């Protein structure tokens, strides 16, 4: 039987998936603009992309959600290399925070309905 995912887990995994797609394009941009050496761009961008995808699968664990928060900070830190990323990351972090708060709220409401 398939495990039932919480709303929080579903929403946060969507955000991490979108951030992984974002990192693909950020990696190509960093390479194209020669912001960093090619090896650094592809290794760093690829590593972060893989971390985002793997973390999306680990959100069932409390530490997986914490890892997601850490990755939000790492995403924001990419602004050091490409300053426009400060703005883009701020948008994604805002989406992450909203999904975290709203997902937990929905999960609480669902558990209260099931208890009734």
Image (tube, helix red, strand yellow):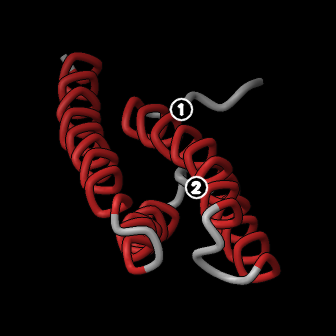
Write the residue at 28% across / 34% down: 103
Q: Residues within 10 Å of mark 1 (few under 14, many from 20)?
A: few
Q: Quadrant of residue 108?
A: top left
**Image quarter of the N terminus:** top right
Q: Secondary structure at mark 1?
A: loop
In this view of the protein, which residue sits in the foreground, 14 or 81?
A: 81
Q: Secondary structure at mark 2?
A: helix
Q: Where is mark 1, residue-wise?
A: 5
- Residue 92 picture location, percent across and down: 34, 47
Write the residue at 34% across / 59% down: 84
Is 79 positioned to the left or the right of 113 in the image?
Answer: right
- Residue 112 picture location, percent across and down: 18, 25
Q: Where is mark 2, residue-wise?
A: 26
- Label 2 and label 1: CA atoms lie apart by 30 Å
Is 42 positioned to the left or the right of 101 in the image?
Answer: right
101 lies above or below 102: below
79 lies above or below 39: above
- Residue 61 picture location, percent across and down: 52, 60
Q: Quadrant of residue 79?
A: bottom left
**Image quarter of the C terminus:** top left
Q: Quadrant of residue 105?
A: top left
Write the residue at 73% across / 61% down: 50
Write the residue at 73% across / 83% down: 37
85 lies above or below 4: below
- Residue 69 picture location, percent across and down: 37, 66
């Amino acid at each position: 039987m398939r495990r039932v995912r919480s709303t929080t887990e579903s929403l946060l995994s969507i955000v991490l998936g979108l951030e992984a797609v974002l990192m693909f394009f950020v990696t190509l941009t960093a390479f194209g603009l020669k912001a960093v050496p090619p090896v650094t761009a592809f290794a760093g961008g690829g590593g972060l992309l893989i971390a985002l995808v793997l973390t999306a699968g680990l959100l069932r664990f409390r530490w997986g959600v914490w890892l997601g928060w850490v990755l939000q900070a790492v995403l924001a830190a990419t602004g050091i290399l490409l300053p426009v990323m400060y703005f883009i990351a701020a948008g994604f972090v805002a989406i992450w925070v909203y999904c975290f708060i709203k997902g937990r709220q929905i999960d609480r409401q669902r558990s209260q309905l099931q208890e009734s």
